[in-house]
Amino acid sequence: MTTPSELTHLTLAGARDGLAARRFSAVELADAHVAAIEAGRQLNAFITETPDQARAMAAESDRRIAAGEARPLEGIPLAIKDLFCTEGVATTAGSHILDGFRPAYESTVTANLWRAGAVMLGKANLDEFAMGSSNMTSYHGAVENPWRRQGDNRPLTPGGSSGGSAAAVAARMALGATGTDTGGSIRQPAAFCGIVGIKPTYGRCSRWGIVAFASSLDQAGPMARTVRDAAILLGQMAGHDPKDSTSVPLPVPDFEKALDEGVRGLRIGIPREYRIEGTPPEIEALWQQGIAWLKDAGAEPVEISLPHARYALPTYYIIAPAEASSNLARYDGVRFGLRVPGGSLDEMYENTRAAGFGAEVKRRVLIGTYVLSAGYYDAYYLKAQRVRARIVEDFRNAFQQVDAILTPATPSAAFGLGENMDDPLAMYLNDVFTVTANLAGLPGLSVPGGLSAEGLPLGLQVLGRAFDEATVLRVGQAIERAAGFDAKPAMVGGAA
Amino acid sequence: MAIDPETVAHIARLARIKVTEDEKAALAGELSTILQWIEQLDEVDTAGVEPVSSVVDAVLPWREDRVTDGGQAEKVLRNAPEAVPGFFAVPKVVE
């Protein structure tokens, strides 16, 4: 008999093997996670819990396992970021404006996961419309990071926007989770919570049925506790979908199998522009450690230059709000969600959007409207798209010399809940290392490398060529092995 | 570029978001700070560079012009704040 806490501490791969060997049932595995979610409600990681659905899906998994018809993710309990539409289950995007919305359809990525046998535990909290790096902008309240600084019990941010997903996985409430990443929203919370997250190449996962933020940047990806687990999940989430015209008709490699290839002989780019003034010395030290680990594993570090990397963040803060202002025009109080009455149709729109959107979403919609408006379109929007072309070119040049790039994942460890809220620019700087991958459409992975002096997880980032997630995962696994990161938050049995 | 409260009112109107007088003043300050920070892009030489709108090299696919979905008005209307059978309902637009 395996105890519930042993079940929630398994890796996804371990649970898969345990289910196949009939050491425990899918219902036992689901129940253990449902109980962990209930016990950890103070983290506010979930907006909607779906225990009945979880048990029903797990019972079907047990039936399939007994019949010898197990699918690749049979019985694996997952948290789903509440940005993915789930048929008949409330989908909020962390916003007041989607109150009461129950999608009549299932997103392609979640449909792929269910078709592979996975079990839904619930919908994970997030920054409103995925706009934020702290989870503070959710209408449904902030999420707490399960980690604490040593000897300091004040709550910390899990990062964002996929903060509920990251907190749930780190707190052993789910074996894995879906996230989305527009500027760093998978990788930054993964780093802050000591887990693995990968944003695949733009076009690798279908965006159909994911509430849109910035359509040329958004990508779905997995969050899990090991690189292998992330590889397993990505393999099932990815794939061509005719319903998303930007989804690419390429075969999905066996990412898990690719991990066996190691990193011997790979050339790893170290971009000199990522040495940013004001970065804490322990982040720089971890980066140097990461370079040494890869060298020991047989890879060759190569200094490279990405001359326009420093312009990525301001470029992003034109393009992302511009696309958001267009995407969020659909929330008009007519077809779904909140409606606040007004004397005229226009007044109804204005009242609904004033009440339904939070402060950060309004700021971004207004910036986006401004940079797209007559007279400013060329100076801001077209300029940003031209700088984006420069950034894409930088990576193209770099990947002629190297197979992957290693950088820090974030410029700091997790900060206190509520910090950085009075200065939007300070918050935006969280994405300084991650945002280039979105602008260039490239895959990026965050993997835990160690703990800060205060006992908080720190992540390293691996970037790769378009559609070469396999190499990114291989490099990530080499770091994971060398780092031997096995620290856990105190609330689930780690050192206090 | 600094944004004044009148400009905020104009773009808020374009975006159909009601803003109070207090919000206008606060937003003018916040948006100006963000735009001034963004203007560092002027340092980048982009002469002759084509703007990038998509990083996917593939040409958008064509498909056969036939109906593949639809006939789900009832399901769709279930999410409407106000509906009458077969239609979304909105405040009166034409007198």
Image (tube, rainbow, N blue to C red):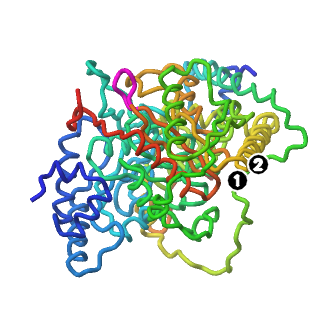
- In this picture, is B57 found above or below A463? below
The type of residue carrying mark 1 is: Val
Instruction: Pick the residue in front: A169 or A467.
Output: A467
Instruction: Name the outermost residue toward the right.
Output: B48
Judge the density around disc 2: few (<14), some (14-19), many (≥20) Cα neighbours within 10 Å: some
Quadrant assignment, res A316: top right
Q: Position of residue A10 (x, y in %)?
A: 25, 52
Q: Is residue A35 magenta?
A: no
User: How far apart are the alpha carbons under marks 2 and 1?
Assistant: 7 Å
Q: Chain of mark 2?
A: B
Residue at 49 percent across and 32 percent down: it is A289
Residue A343 seen in the current view: no
Q: Chain of mark 1?
A: B
Left or right: where does residue A53 sit relative to residue B84?
left
Q: Position of residue A430 (x, y in %)?
A: 53, 30
Q: Which residue was labeled with disc 2?
A: B52
Find numbered disc 2 in the image and state the secondary structure of the residue it sits on: loop
Which quarter of the rendered picture does the C terminus of chain A lie within? top left
Question: Magenta stretch mostly in which secondary structure?
Answer: loop
The label on residue B55 is 1
Residue A377 seen in the current view: yes
Quadrant assignment, res B61: bottom right
The label on residue A160 is none
Instruction: Tell me whether the residue at label 2 lies in contact with that at label 1, contact meaning CB atoms closer than 8 angstroms.
Output: yes
Judge the density around disc 1: few (<14), some (14-19), many (≥20) Cα neighbours within 10 Å: many
Find the magenta span and give its range.
A451-457
Q: Position of residue A49 (x, y in %)?
A: 27, 51
The type of residue carrying mark 2 is: Val
Left or right: where does residue A366 sit relative to residue A116?
right
Q: Position of residue A460 (x, y in %)?
A: 50, 37
- In this picture, is B24 found above or below B74? above
Total numbered labels placed on residues in the image: 2
